[in-house]
């Protein structure tokens, strides 16, 4: 009889553990910079609990890094909500042709082209992924690689919308084949890798975000904040001085940015 009770008690414990798993604090949260604000600002506290996950997202989990300075989570969520309205950096909408002249090829706008990350797969969360870039100040961002102008304004924010690459079967249609105007040309989602294989966008991966604050802002990399947010824009999975991002971006040619690859 006593043995049966014991069995019930033990199984009861297993059951409750499975329903409400113990949530261990991510190890590197304690590594958050000591000069960062110890308490999240009040607007951070008002955010739903999904603002700060208890475990890294699957896209980020295998990088072995998980740094999350909650101070920066509200802005990262805001950027994740707004960025598609900024437009992709390399696209230009179609222009309505002026009266009394035939439409020129330049009226047709330019579609965005998905790009393959140049970052080494073993070292970077970008590796083997396709991406589109969005920038809050699009023209300033484009100038980085078009001229030798390295200035990045405070307030700039760049979102790298990453996609898992899957084999594509047919080449992209020529953008000039589209006859109509007044709309944004759809992005080209097919790209060729170094070995000439065609790839296209599969499942969407995390959003990789970098934004710039004043240089002296505590908890930033000379003003730069790095972060990752899940593809649905709802959960911040890393934020602040994320060491893994800094490992590469500290050596980038334009302050902490690589700029758009041509
Ligand atoms: C191994 C090096 C490497 C690491 C690690 C890395 N990046 Fe990048 N990142 C690049 C390169 C190279 C580019 C240029 C585009 C490309 O080829 O992927 C880039 C581009 C970007 C861009 C576009 C803005 C620009 O011009 O630089 C963003 C945003 C970005 N990375 C965010 C991040 C975040 C956030 C992390 C950390 C979670 C991170 N990156 C980690 C190498 C890296």
Image (spheres, rainbow, N blue to C red):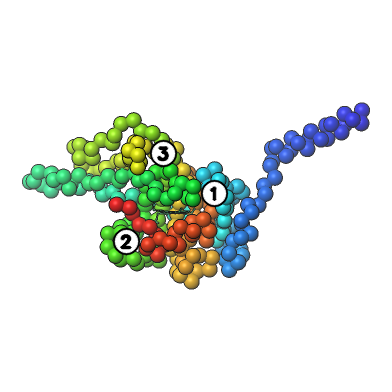
Picture quadrant of ligand 1: bottom left
Query: Which of pointers 2 and 1 indicates the residue nearer the eye?
Result: 1
Q: Is residue 12 above or below residue 53?
A: above
Q: Which residue is mark 2?
A: 144
Q: CA distance from mark 1 to mark 3?
A: 18 Å
Residue tagged by mark 1?
Answer: 63
Q: Residues within 10 Å of mark 1 (few under 14, many from 20)?
A: some
Q: CA distance from mark 2 to mark 1?
A: 29 Å
Query: Image point 24% across, 46% down: which residue?
Result: 110
Mark 2 near ligand 1 (CB under 8 Å)? yes
Percent position (x, y) of residue 2? 92, 31
- Whether residue 37 sits left or right of residue 184 in the image: it is right
- Residue with the most extreme front position: 195
Asked which secondary structure carries label 1, the reply is loop
Q: Residue at x 39, y 47 (%)?
A: 117
Residue under label 3: 165
Q: Is residue 42 left or right of residue 114?
A: right
Beta carbon of the mark 1 residue lies under 8 A of ligand 1: yes
């Amino acid at each position: 009889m006593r043995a049966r009770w014991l069995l019930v008690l033990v199984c009861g414990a297993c059951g409750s553990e499975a329903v409400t798993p113990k949530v261990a604090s991510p190890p590197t949260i304690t590594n958050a910079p000591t000069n960062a604000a110890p308490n999240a600002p009040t607007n951070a506290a008002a955010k739903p609990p999904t603002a700060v996950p208890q475990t890294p997202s699957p896209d980020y989990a295998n990088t072995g890094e998980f740094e999350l300075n909650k101070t920066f989570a509200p802005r990262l969520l805001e950027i994740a909500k707004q960025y598609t309205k900024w437009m992709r950096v390399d696209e230009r909408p179609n222009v309505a042709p002026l009266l009394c002249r035939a439409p020129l090829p330049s009226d047709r706008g330019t579609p965005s082209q998905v790009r393959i990350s140049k970052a080494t797969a073993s070292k970077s969360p970008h590796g083997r992924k396709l991406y589109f870039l969005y920038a809050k100040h699009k023209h300033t961002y484009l100038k980085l690689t078009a001229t030798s102008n390295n200035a990045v304004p405070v307030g700039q924010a760049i979102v790298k919308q990453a996609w898992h690459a899957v084999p594509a079967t047919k080449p992209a249609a020529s953008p000039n084949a589209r006859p109509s105007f007044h709309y944004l040309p759809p992005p080209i989602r097919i790209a060729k890798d170094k070995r000439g294989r065609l790839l296209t966008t599969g499942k969407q991966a995390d959003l990789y975000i970098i934004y710039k604050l004043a240089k002296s802002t505590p908890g930033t990399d000379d003003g730069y904040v790095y972060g990752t947010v899940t593809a649905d824009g709802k959960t911040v999975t890393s934020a602040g001085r994320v060491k893994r991002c800094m490992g590469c971006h500290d050596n980038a040619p334009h302050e902490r940015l690589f700029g758009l690859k041509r």
